[in-house]
Image (cartoon, grey):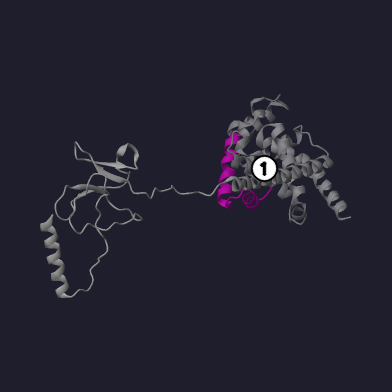
Amino acid sequence: MQKKAATDAFDQLYLGHARPLAQQALLLSGHREIAERAVAHAFHRAWQRWPQVAVDSDPPGWLRAAVYDYALSPWHQLHPARNRPEAPTGPPADQELREALLSLPRSYRATLLLCDGLGLSLADAAAETEASTAAAGGRLVHARDRVAAHCAELRAVPPEQRGPLLARRLREVAAALPVRVAPPRLARRGSEHATRRTTLAALGLTAAVTAATAFTLVSAEPSRGPERDWTEPEITMSARSGSPSYSGSPSGTAPSGRALVSTPPRGHGPRVARPLPGPAEPRTRADRHGRRIQPGDRAWLPQLRSTNARMHLKNVEKQEKQEKREGQEK
């Protein structure tokens, strides 16, 4: 029962305002196809939002705002229909007035048609065009002057009579424009089909995004950092040049990213190049007796942790004598 009441109210509103709105849109846009599309778009939106439109204080005003917004959209300049000229209709005076109206800016066009064509007050026209009253008044004055400069019949009358004459001529020209309006049931059916297509498109897009996200999560592998080689290369001395060579690294060169220093061991012996220890490389004990490092032996590395222990002074003297005796024996 409620749907039947909503359908009847919509059909009554459509039959009473669809054709006048199409004629006004034709005056604003200058092309019949764009005007008819503007009316269809406005009523499609009205049926989709019918609970809100039905309780609006001015449903015809709501529809008129939607029609004007669509008809005056700057994107219609790129519409293919703009490139197809239409056959002139009506007497030459009507054509002259329509061309003068189309020469105005879009905001001037809407203000002139609302005030002079429909008889709205300046405050209502300002509210409908989303402008201040002063701005709407300035647009109206300039629009009247520019239209009068293009129309001979308006120039022939005194300035104080141009307003009423222009209002009457706009209504006559709009009422004579031939427009095509679809039946109300087709408008409702088109709105329902548009709503269904929009809903299906939204559901399809959501499903596609969900599937892409799930595929990405399933196919993605956990990232692994680069594997490090914790084996320490063997450093040997070349017999000819005395330069160090490395086993365990390509081409016998030092591993990348490790600086080399040359540090002699205690006592006597050649200077041996060694790599600086990494953060996790094994540490070796230093040679305490000053023995020379033979080719093929591991490089000498300093001990980073102190091994000092508490000793008696007599034990220190004994150790020094023993080390001195071993050195003389060598």
* Residue occupying image coordinates x 75% and y 48%: 46
- In-front residue for pair 214/242: 242
Horizontal side of 228 relative to 127 (left or right) equals left
In the rendered structure, does residue 129 fall within the stretch colored magenta? yes
Residue 63 visible here: yes
Q: Position of residue 118 (x, y in %)?
A: 70, 44
The residue most toward the front is 329
Location of the N terminus (image quadrant) = bottom right
The residue most toward the right is 1
In the rendered structure, does residue 210 fall within the stretch colored magenta? no
- Quadrant of residue 156 in the image? top right
Residue extent of the magenta highlight: 119-148
Location of the C terminus (image quadrant) = bottom left
The residue most toward the left is 328
Q: Is residue 105 above or below residue 288?
A: above
Q: Position of residue 251 (x, y in %)?
A: 32, 36
- In-front residue for pair 226/292: 292
How packed mark 1 is, by other alpha carbons closer than 10 Å (few <14, some 14-19, many 20 or more), is many
Q: Amino acid at mark 1?
A: Tyr
User: What predominant SS class does the magenta segment belong to?
Assistant: helix
